[in-house]
C-alpha cells in the first residue's frame, strides 16, 4: 500500500484511476455527435440507433454491483485488467463493425467492461489512499477526470467524426486501453484471489433487476409510463430487486452486497444522496445544453463551448473541495453545494428566448458547476468511507450504481416534466432541479457532521 514512503507509486495509481474514469465517461458521451453518420453507414432504424447509447448505459449500470464484488474477490488488478481488455476489444469490434447488430453488441460489451473498471478504480483509491487528506485529494482528482471526460467527449466526437470517420470514436479506445493495461500491470500489486464463492444467484437477480428497472425508465419518456413496454420492465425490475434483497439477507452465504454495509451511516446516506445528485447532474449537463440549442438557437458545438466555463468551474472547485473536506466535513460541503444548486437553477429558470448568454446562462451555470465540484467528490468520499477494506470494491459499486440509477431516472422524469422544448418547459425542469438541491441539503443532515467522522473507517 503506498504511503509517504512511495509517492511515485501512489502517483501512478492515482493517474491510472483517473485515466480509467476519464475513459469510461468519455465513452458515454463521445458517440453522441457521431450517431447521424453511424445511422447512415450502417442503416440503423431510428429505434435501433438509440441502442448504440442505451446498450452501453444499460449494462454499465446493471453490472456495476457485480464488478464491485469482483474487485473485492479477485483484486483491483485482475478486475481492472479484465475490464480494460473487454472495453478495448469491444471498441475494436465496434470500430470495425460492418452492420448494426455487431455495433450494438460491441456497445453492450463495452458497458460490461466499464462496469468492471469503475468500481475497481474506486477500490484502488479507498485501498491505496488511507490517510484522510490524501484520500480527499484523490477523490477530487478522480471526480475532475470524469468531468474532463464528459466535456472532451462531445468535442472529440465531433473532431474524430469530421476529420477521420465515426469508426475512430470506437477505435481510439484500443491504444488508450493498451497503455492503461501496461500501467496497471506495473502499478497495482498482485493479490491472491479470496477463496469465497461468488454469489451467482444474487449477481443474476441484482443485475437483471437493475437492468430491467433502468430499461423501463429509459423507455418511459417515449412510450408513456402506463404502457406495457414501460410498466412491465419497471414492475419486473422491482420484483427482481426485492428477490435480490431477500436472497442477500437470508439465502446467500457470501452475498454479493452484504446488507450490513448499508447500516454504515456514510454508505447509506452517501448512496441515497448520489441518487439525487445523479438527477442534478443530468439537469445541468443535458438540459442546459438542449436549452442553449432549443431556446437560444445555439449549434451543438456552440452549446458545448457555452458549457465550458461551468465545466472549468467544476474541475477547479473539485480539487479545492479535497482540501476543505478534512476541515469542514462532508455535511458542510454538501449543504454549501446544495445552496449553489438552488441559486443557480433558480436563476436559470428565469431565462427565456430573449435572454443573453452572459446574463442568463453563464452566471447560473457557473454556480451549478461549482456546486457539482463541491458535492460530487464529497459524496463519493462519504459513500465509500467507513466500510471495511475487504469490501472496498462492492461499496464503490454501490456508490457508482446509485449515481447511474439517479441519472437514468432523473433524465426520464425531467424529460416528462418538461413536456416540450419551449422556454417554459425548461423553466419547469430547472425549478424541479432547484427543489432537488434543497432535498440534497435536507438529506445531507444524515451525513457525519465532523471531518473526523466523515473520514473514519471501520475495521474489517
Image (cartoon, grey):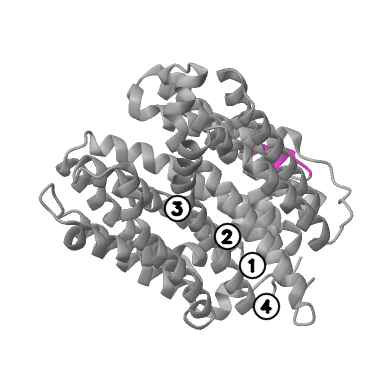
Q: Work out how far the residue at label 2 is from the one at label 3, CA to CA, in angstroms.
A: 29 Å
Label 4: few (<14), some (14–19) or many (≥20) C-alpha neighbours in 10 Å: few
* x and y, in percent, of residue 323 in the image: 52, 79
Extreme residue in the left direction: 354
Q: Mark 3 points at which residue?
A: 151
Q: Name the residue under label 1.
A: 386
Residue 100 is tagged as: none
Q: Work out how far the residue at label 3 is from the one at label 1, CA to CA, in angstroms.
A: 32 Å
Q: Quarter of the image for the N terminus: give it.
A: bottom right
Q: Work out how far the residue at label 3 is from the one at label 4, CA to CA, in angstroms.
A: 30 Å
- Do labels 1 and 2 touch, CB within 8 Å? yes
> Which mark sits nearer the N-terminus, 1 or 4?
4
SS at circle 2: helix
SS at circle 4: loop
Q: Work out how far the residue at label 1 is from the one at label 4, CA to CA, in angstroms.
A: 13 Å
Residue in the foreground of this view, choosing between 459 and 181: 181
Q: Is residue 247 magenta?
A: yes
Q: Quadrant of residue 115?
A: top right
Q: Quarter of the image for the C terminus: give it.
A: bottom right
> Which mark sits nearer the N-terminus, 4 or 2?
4
Magenta-tinted stretch: 246-253
Q: Work out how far the residue at label 1 is from the one at label 2, CA to CA, in angstroms.
A: 7 Å
* x and y, in percent, of residue 274 in the image: 47, 55
Q: Name the residue under label 2.
A: 267
Amino acid at each position: 500500500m503506498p504511503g509517504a514512503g512511495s509517492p511515485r507509486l501512489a502517483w501512478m495509481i492515482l493517474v491510472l484511476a483517473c485515466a480509467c474514469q476519464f475513459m469510461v465517461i468519455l465513452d458515454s458521451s463521445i458517440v453522441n455527435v457521431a450517431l447521424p453518420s453511424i445511422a447512415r453507414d450502417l442503416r440503423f432504424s431510428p429505434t435501433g440507433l438509440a441502442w448504440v447509447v442505451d446498450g452501453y448505459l444499460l449494462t454499465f449500470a446493471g453490472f456495476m454491483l457485480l464488478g464491485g464484488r469482483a474487485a473485492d474477490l479477485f483484486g483491483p488488478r485482475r478486475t481492472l485488467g479484465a475490464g480494460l481488455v473487454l472495453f478495448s476489444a469491444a471498441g475494436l469490434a465496434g470500430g470495425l463493425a460492418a452492420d448494426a447488430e455487431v455495433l450494438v453488441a460491441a456497445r453492450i460489451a463495452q458497458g460490461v467492461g466499464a462496469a468492471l473498471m469503475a468500481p475497481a478504480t474506486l477500490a484502488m483509491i479507498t485501498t491505496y489512499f488511507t490517510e484522510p487528506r490524501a484520500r480527499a485529494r484523490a477523490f477530487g482528482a478522480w471526480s475532475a477526470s470524469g468531468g474532463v471526460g464528459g466535456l472532451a467527449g462531445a468535442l472529440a466526437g465531433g473532431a474524430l467524426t469530421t476529420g477521420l470517420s465515426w469508426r475512430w470514436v470506437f477505435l481510439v479506445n484500443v491504444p488508450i486501453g493498451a497503455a492503461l493495461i501496461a500501467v496497471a500491470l506495473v502499478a497495482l500489486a498482485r493479490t491472491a484471489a479470496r477463496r469465497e464463492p461468488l454469489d451467482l444467484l444474487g449477481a443474476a437477480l441484482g443485475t437483471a433487476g437493475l437492468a430491467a428497472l433502468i430499461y423501463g425508465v429509459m423507455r418511459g419518456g417515449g412510450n408513456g409510463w402506463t404502457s406495457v413496454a414501460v410498466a412491465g420492465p419497471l414492475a419486473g425490475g422491482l420484483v427482481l430487486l426485492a428477490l435480490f434483497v431477500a436472497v442477500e439477507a437470508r439465502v446467500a452465504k457470501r452475498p454479493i452486497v452484504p446488507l450490513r454495509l448499508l447500516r454504515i451511516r456514510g454508505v447509506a446516506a452517501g448512496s441515497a444522496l448520489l441518487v439525487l445528485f445523479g438527477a442534478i447532474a443530468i439537469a445541468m449537463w443535458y438540459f442546459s445544453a438542449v436549452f442553449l440549442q432549443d431556446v437560444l438557437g445555439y449549434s451543438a458545438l456552440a452549446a458545448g463551448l457555452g458549457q465550458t466555463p461551468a465545466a472549468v468551474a467544476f474541475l477547479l472547485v473539485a480539487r479545492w473541495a479535497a482540501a476543505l473536506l478534512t476541515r469542514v466535513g462532508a455535511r458542510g460541503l454538501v449543504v454549501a453545494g446544495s445552496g449553489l444548486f438552488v441559486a443557480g437553477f433558480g436563476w436559470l429558470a428565469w431565462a427565456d428566448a430573449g435572454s443573453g448568454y452572459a446574463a442568463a446562462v453563464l452566471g447560473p451555470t457557473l454556480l451549478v458547476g461549482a456546486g457539482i465540484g463541491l458535492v460530487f467528490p464529497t459524496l463519493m468520499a462519504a459513500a465509500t468511507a467507513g466500510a471495511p477494506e475487504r469490501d472496498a470494491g462492492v461499496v464503490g459499486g454501490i456508490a457508482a450504481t446509485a449515481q447511474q440509477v439517479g441519472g437514468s431516472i432523473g433524465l426520464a422524469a425531467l424529460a416528462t416534466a418538461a413536456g416540450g422544448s419551449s422556454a417554459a418547459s425548461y423553466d419547469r425542469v430547472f425549478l424541479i432541479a432547484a427543489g432537488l438541491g434543497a432535498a440534497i441539503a435536507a438529506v445531507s443532515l444524515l451525513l457525519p457532521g465532523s471531518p473526523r467522522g466523515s473520514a473514519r473507517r471501520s475495521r474489517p
